[in-house]
Amino acid sequence: QVQLVESGGGLVQAGGSLRLSCAASRTIFSIADMGWYRQAPGKQRELVADITSSGRTNYADFVKGRFTISRDNAKNTVSLQMNGLKFDDTAVYYCAARRFGVAQYDSWGQGTQVTVSA
């Protein structure tokens, strides 16, 4: 597993932007996929976006056109640029990593709170 530390959460008004960052404790060249999940109060954790080692991205329908995931293998980081934030985007956002040869995400960050005021 790899240790992941998120940063960049906070309080923002609807329509605003935030950028989340996730730093890995070691090189992410050995990591197949990295992703961002979120969990709102009373709801299950859901995938927001993920990115493969080759840079292929995938987005949940509810963030398409608003969020952008990026990955910097040299800096061992993955970021999530969130624009056009909505009240429903309020949640704890988690960074996750899946190593090559492992079927599911097996490393998780502690989460960072994103609160969007209406």
Image: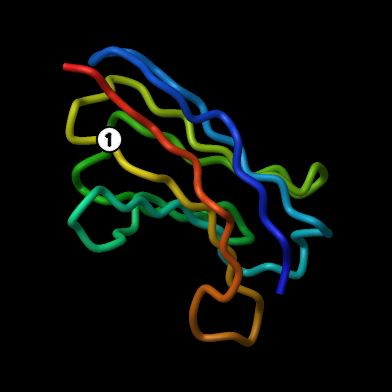
- Residue 28 spot, x, y in % from top left: 75, 59
What's the residue type where badge 1 is placed? Thr
Residue drawn at (60%, 35%), measured in percent from left and top? 7
From the viewer's perspective, tell me whether residue 68 is left or right of residue 42: right
Residue at image point 51% right, 26% down? 19
| Mark 1 Cα shell of 10 Å, populated few (<14), some (14-19), many (≥20) | many
- Relative depth, front residue between 5 and 52: 5
Q: Is residue 103 above or below residue 108?
A: below
User: Where the N terminus falls, by quadrant?
Assistant: bottom right
Q: Residue at x 31, y 61 (%)?
A: 45
Residue occupied by mark 1: 90
Residue that protrudes farthest toward the front in the picture: 42
Residue 94's place in the image compared with 117, above or below, is below
Coordinates of residue 10 in the picture (x, y in percent)? 45, 24
Judged from the image, the secondary structure of the residue bearing numbered disc 1 is: loop
Quadrant showing the C terminus: top left
- Taking 53 as reference, is 66 above or below it? above
Percent x, y for residue 25?
A: 80, 56
- The image quadrant of residue 15 is top left
